[in-house]
Amino acid sequence: MTHSSKDKTLALAGVFQAASLVKQIANTGTANSAIVESSIESLFRIDADNVAAVYGNIAGVNHGLHVLQEQLSNNQPTEDLEITKYAISMIALERKLSRNKKMLDNITDGLQTIESQLAFFSLSHNTIFSKIAELYKTTISTLGRKIMVSGEQPYLSNETNASKVRALLLAGIRSAVLWQQCGGSRWQFIFRRKTYLQECEKMLRVL
């Protein structure tokens, strides 16, 4: 199936949304709960009919579109390079993960088990975050190249925050998988920045 530039932009915005949320939690201990839920929910929409449906709708990745637009505009403070660093790390891990079918199957099975518990716990319940975080630790963290998250130590050492960060990293990698499936690539991101920026602007105008 051929995917449009819009599809690729939405998936990449999912990566940058997760990266931005990771930075917020690591530095402030908090992030908008509705946006966090939109990212986490994407983990359980494996068989969505289209790219937008992975995030519920385009509005579900609204924050990510804003972040991606800002990153592509080349006029942001240097500290926002941290968001790009996380995004690139997620994309790199996706490449390693895609070559490990057994791990992909383990993640799918693990998410299905966690999804069955959503009948008892809300998506934003600490139990769900901790179970997704544990899945991340037993799978992605063993790939050899860990994502080093920077921030304020009191927030990073908080177990609830640590679980949210790992859960969001997994959500970001899920979006990276989707981006690759849509035909996205790191070279394309470098040389087709203008196309991504234009797609961001078009979608944001109607949100």
Image (tube, rainbow, N blue to C red):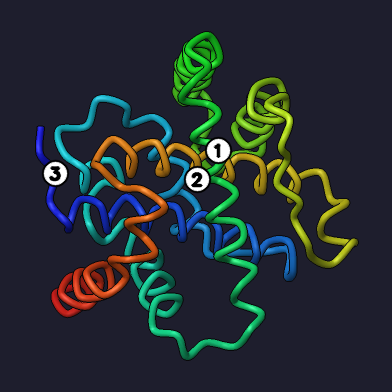
User: Mark 2 or mark 1: which comes first in sequence?
Assistant: 2
Q: Position of residue 26 (x, y in %)?
A: 73, 61
Mark 2 residue type: Ile
* 2 vs 1, front mark: 2
Which quadrant, please, contains the C terminus? bottom left
Residue under label 2, please give it.
Answer: 91
Q: CA distance from mark 2 to mark 3?
A: 18 Å
Q: Is residue 203 left or right of residue 111?
A: left
* 1 vs 3, front mark: 3
Residue under label 1, please give it.
Answer: 170
Q: Secondary structure at mark 1?
A: helix
Residue under label 3, please give it.
Answer: 3
Could you tell me which residue is drawn at 15 percent across and 75 percent down?
Answer: 202
User: Mark 2 or mark 3: which comes first in sequence?
Assistant: 3
Q: Position of residue 70 (x, y in %)?
A: 42, 80
Q: Is residue 55 above or below residue 145?
A: below
Which quadrant, please, contains the N terminus? top left
| Residue 54 image-quadrant placement | top left
Could you tell me which residue is drawn at 14 percent across and 44 percent down?
Answer: 3
